Image (cartoon, rainbow, N blue to C red):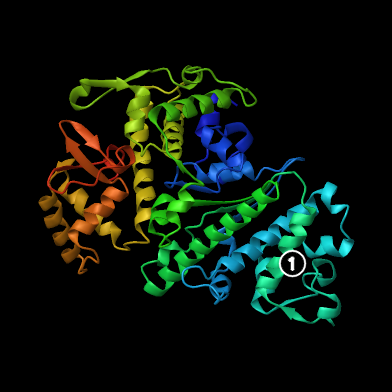
Amino acid sequence: MSVLNEVAQWQIEATNEDPHRYFFHTKDFEKITSGSMSFVIGRKGSGKTAIAERLAQRNHSSFSRKLSFRDFPFGLLYSRPDDSYSHPHQYITIWRYVIYRYICSMMVENQDVARNFSESICKKFQIDITDALDLTVERITGSELNASFLGVSGSKRKNTESVPISLSEANKALSDFIWSNVDDCPYFVLFDELDEDYGRVLEKERREEYFSLIVGLFQAIELISAESKRHGRKVMPIAFLRDDIFELCPSQDRNKWLDKATYLTWTSTQLRNLLNFRLYRAANPHARVAKPGEGWPLVFDVVETRFGTKRKKKKNTFDYLLDHTFARPRDIVHIVRESARQSIDMGLERINNAAITAADLEHSRYMKREVQAEFLPIMEENDFVFEAISVMGKQLFRYNELKERLAMTFNSHGYKCPLTDAQVVRMLYRFNVIGNEESGRRFFLYNSSSRSVDLEGNLCVHRGLLKALDVY
């Protein structure tokens, strides 16, 4: 397969890609694998799932379980609050139980540890997430946790085959069992895609439950990580969460969690290095090192791109591509992949400026879909917002112009906008649809996180969305 054909098959979702071939190691990854970080926070598309997938790759010396909120029956989780904790901490107990069970299942998988267990113990801990949660729906019995070895039998517990024990008792027994038997191998319990139930957060009751689940999970991770450290072991539960959801968590512990959190952010230099690495690996699947710039000429035959009216402006080609993204790895992967596909259709051996231009429309549509997916949980009528921008048809505009167009568009569809005009603009800024333009420079949230949108200044549409919104 040619290098160009390989690039044309790159995957946007990390779950669909070979993590050994394309995973790009960063200092953030080293912090996570060392156990110094328990929470990975970042924008959608910033690489959270790629890290989780890489950690989930099993080998003879480490063990992992990757869990997604897609795997969790939310009704069961919401039905198991621990009333001994006040809101929003009532789900710590259920999360500790789930994490402990998965640690035990990995210990059973580790032959060096499992050889010390009986066959019945091993069988009890060969579980999946449904098993782990189903045990909490009815009742937990001594037999379900093999009470004889977990220390809840004997004179204090007669007829342990049917005696129910509480979730807290189960956690105590599991904790004692783990720290008495676990070895020095790393054990990762990875929680990814935690935004699965985020779509209902505008419902007040569900919003409180959802964030209570997140808070409980973080606190359970914090407690178990501290236990691991006290016992000198490498048991590492890790949560991966979108930054906007993390910022909405109501817990006063959020600042404390920041000490154990790594924020995934990408500079243009880091993204350039990532792309160079991927291009080099496309040609050399097992290569260990890619020198700076070594991958680019394998796939591109241009280093400069002209654009603007009559193509009078020019820019480094990578920087031109970067301007059409939200500075996220997945966006870079997409625009290069689409350029490769266009090159193949044109009969080219490498990507040139014509192929990049031809890829612009499909890439812009992808960018719009990405934004709408984030916008949807907050505002179902987001199509009307994008329609208003399209009808306005301008890259640069003022707040009052957009405000007027929003009112006209919603009225034409017989809807009332559920947010105020200012809220709509702030949400558009939050998801990088629009930014501010000052003295020829454009500022968006992803490249100026310390700034808030200036409603009095010039507003601009992100370049990566122009074609999809039919704005020129």
Q: Is residue 132 visible?
A: yes
Q: SS class of the residue under badge 1? A: helix
In the picture of the structure, the residue carrying the numbered disc 1 is 173
Q: Is residue 426 above or below residue 209?
A: above
Q: Left or right: 179 with respect to 460? A: right
Q: Left or right: 146 with respect to 278? A: right
Give the amino acid at mark 1.
Ala
- Return the x and y of residue 221 as percentages of the image width and height: 58, 56
Q: Nearer the viewer, residue 338 or 375?
A: 375
Residue at the spot x=32%, y=37% of the render?
A: 447
Q: Number of marks in the image?
A: 1
Which quadrant is the N terminus positioned in? top right
Q: Left or right: 23 with respect to 366? A: right
Q: Is residue 228 above or below residue 121?
A: above
Q: Is residue 160 visible?
A: no
- Return the x and y of residue 116 as percentages of the image width and height: 88, 54
Residue at the spot x=67%, y=42% of the render?
A: 57
Q: Nearer the viewer, residue 391 or 464?
A: 464
- Return the x and y of residue 319 as percentages of the image width and height: 34, 26
Q: Is residue 417 above or below residue 398?
A: below
Image quadrant in which you'd find residue 161: bottom right
- Return the x and y of residue 61 as percentages of the image width and height: 75, 40
Residues packed near mark 1 inside 10 Å, few (<14), some (14 to 19) or many (20 plus): some
Which quadrant is the C terminus positioned in? top left
Image quadrant in which you'd find residue 97: bottom right
Residue at the spot x=25%, y=38% of the render?
A: 443
